[in-house]
Image: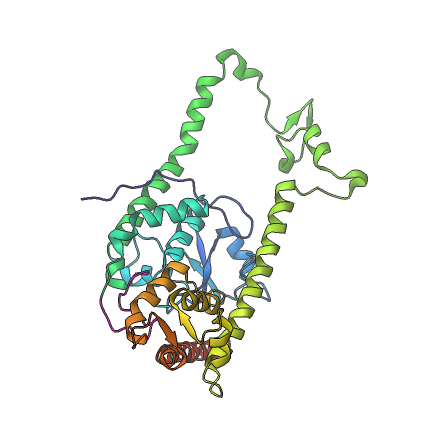
């Protein structure tokens, strides 16, 4: 049974000039040959030309600023291979696609709010994400069910869905100008067509092409007194303020996460300071809700993970670490989970170092 498609959407906007795409989009690549993107953002053709000569090639999105080494056409779901398109969507290079990465594809290719994009993904997720059993101590968040992201096999069902939606939206965007032109022919009376002046002529004088269609009143309202320039719309000021506040919160959360991870990995006390910090009632044990909160605070800033995912992890490993069945975990029982977490963190550090070396080799 075919999955229901959302309605076609208007095309998205270039991250640099904020103009609507004409159908061709370009991605920022860290390593194009390996299909590794620097980030999820896209730019238009004209901006690609100017950005290619930047001395500091960083993503123009102020909250991203990831470095890129080349700009090439974005891959399309209807023409790219499953292998290449999987890597294109998985811009975090984790080898597994998250809901956030799929939502980012919608938001960067089309004019779509984040809540709507996530709702679209959530509505189909249960059809794509197929749980697979495995040992909870296996690297990769030590969970007994492989659920919450997509591997390459699961992604095979996703690509055709995205391809159909992509094609329908492109077709709708191409048909829109023709529809508007036809509507204009109907709306303008026949006798009035001859008297319509070109948009660049107002009151017998020509305006510069860039200002054609703008009234003098509109310009006066947007200019600051004394000719200091153009005021920013209030909505833009509010957006900038919100972006800066969000950036500061993210920085603080990341800093707290790193500090808690250092405490957890401390070999001198075997994570005792971390354990005692989250033992709120000071009874020498962590109840399930205390452990859930502890893991969430420890990894929320550095990993894309939710409370629901942490809760699922704790539920999966609880019987293995609560060996006496008391309903809580004492410090000795906690060591099994701690060692699994440290193994995962060490694995991630090795991967990051290898990626850094690869980046240095690539940049010469």
Q: Quadrant of the N terminus?
A: top left
Quadrant hosting residue 255: bottom right
Residue 332 among those drawn in magenta: no
Of all residues shown, which one is farthest toward the left? 1
147 part of magenta stretch: yes
Q: Residue furthest right?
A: 226
**Image: 309 above or below 260:** above
Give percent across and percent down for residue 115.
Answer: 43, 46
Q: Is residue 264 visible in this depiction of the protein?
A: yes
Q: Residue at x 47, y 78 (%)?
A: 264
The answer to which of 259 and 175 lies nearer the viewer is 259
Q: Which residues are magenta?
A: 133-150
Q: Position of residue 132 (x, y in %)?
A: 22, 65
Residue shown at 45% from the left, 55% from the top: 26
Viewer-side residue, 269 vs 27: 269
Left/right of residue 62 with respect to residue 207 in the rendered view: left
Q: Residue furthest top?
A: 191
Q: Give the residue displayed 51% in from the left and 70% down from the top.
A: 257
Which image quarter: residue 349? bottom left
Instruction: Please say which color scheme the image uses.
Output: rainbow
Say whether residue 15 is left or right of residue 354: right
Q: Where is residue 318 shown, x and y percent of the image?
A: 31, 70
Predominant SS of the magenta segment? loop
**Numbered circles on residues, count:** 0
Give x and y (percent) for residue 304. Answer: 43, 63
Q: Nearer the viewer, residue 196 or 34?
A: 34
| 289 or 229, nearer to the observer | 289
User: Is the residue 206 above or below the residue 99 in the image?
Assistant: above
In the drawing, does residue 40 fall left or right of residue 62?
Answer: left
Q: Do we see residue 28 in this rendering?
A: no
């Amino acid at each position: 049974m075919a999955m229901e498609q959302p309605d076609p959407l208007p095309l998205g906007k270039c991250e640099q000039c904020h103009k609507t795409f004409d159908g061709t989009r370009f991605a920022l690549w860290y390593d194009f040959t390996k299909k590794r993107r620097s980030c999820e953002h896209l730019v238009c053709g004209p901006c690609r030309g100017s950005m290619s000569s930047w001395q500091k090639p960083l993503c123009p999105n102020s909250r991203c600023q990831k470095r890129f080494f080349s700009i090439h056409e974005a891959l399309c779901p209807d023409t790219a291979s499953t292998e290449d398109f999987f890597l294109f969507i998985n811009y975090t290079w984790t080898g597994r696609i998250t809901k956030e990465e799929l939502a980012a594809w919608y938001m960067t290719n089309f004019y779509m709010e984040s809540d709507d994009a996530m709702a679209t993904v959530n509505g189909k997720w249960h059809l794509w994400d197929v749980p697979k059993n495995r040992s909870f101590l296996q690297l990769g968040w030590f969970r007994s069910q492989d659920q919450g992201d997509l591997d390459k096999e699961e992604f095979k069902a996703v690509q055709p869905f995205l391809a159909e939606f992509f094609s329908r939206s492109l077709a709708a965007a191409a048909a829109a100008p023709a529809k508007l032109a036809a509507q204009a022919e109907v709306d303008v009376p026949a006798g009035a067509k001859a008297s319509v002046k070109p948009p660049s002529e107002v009151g017998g004088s020509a305006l510069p092409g860039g200002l054609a269609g703008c009234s003098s009143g509109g310009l006066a309202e947007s200019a600051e007194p004394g000719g200091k320039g153009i005021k920013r719309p209030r909505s833009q000021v509010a957006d900038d303020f919100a972006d800066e506040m969000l950036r500061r919160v993210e920085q603080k959360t990341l800093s707290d996460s790193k500090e808690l991870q250092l405490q957890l990995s401390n070999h001198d006390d075997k994570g005792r300071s971390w354990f005692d910090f989250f033992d709120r009632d000071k009874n020498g044990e962590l109840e399930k809700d205390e452990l859930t909160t502890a893991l969430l605070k420890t990894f929320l800033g550095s990993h894309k993970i939710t409370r629901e995912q942490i809760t699922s992890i704790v539920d999966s490993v609880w019987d293995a670490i609560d060996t006496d069945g008391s309903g809580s975990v004492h410090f000795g029982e906690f060591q099994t989970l701690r060692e699994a977490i440290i193994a995962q963190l060490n694995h991630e550090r090795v991967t990051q170092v290898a990626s850094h070396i690869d980046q240095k080799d690539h940049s010469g």
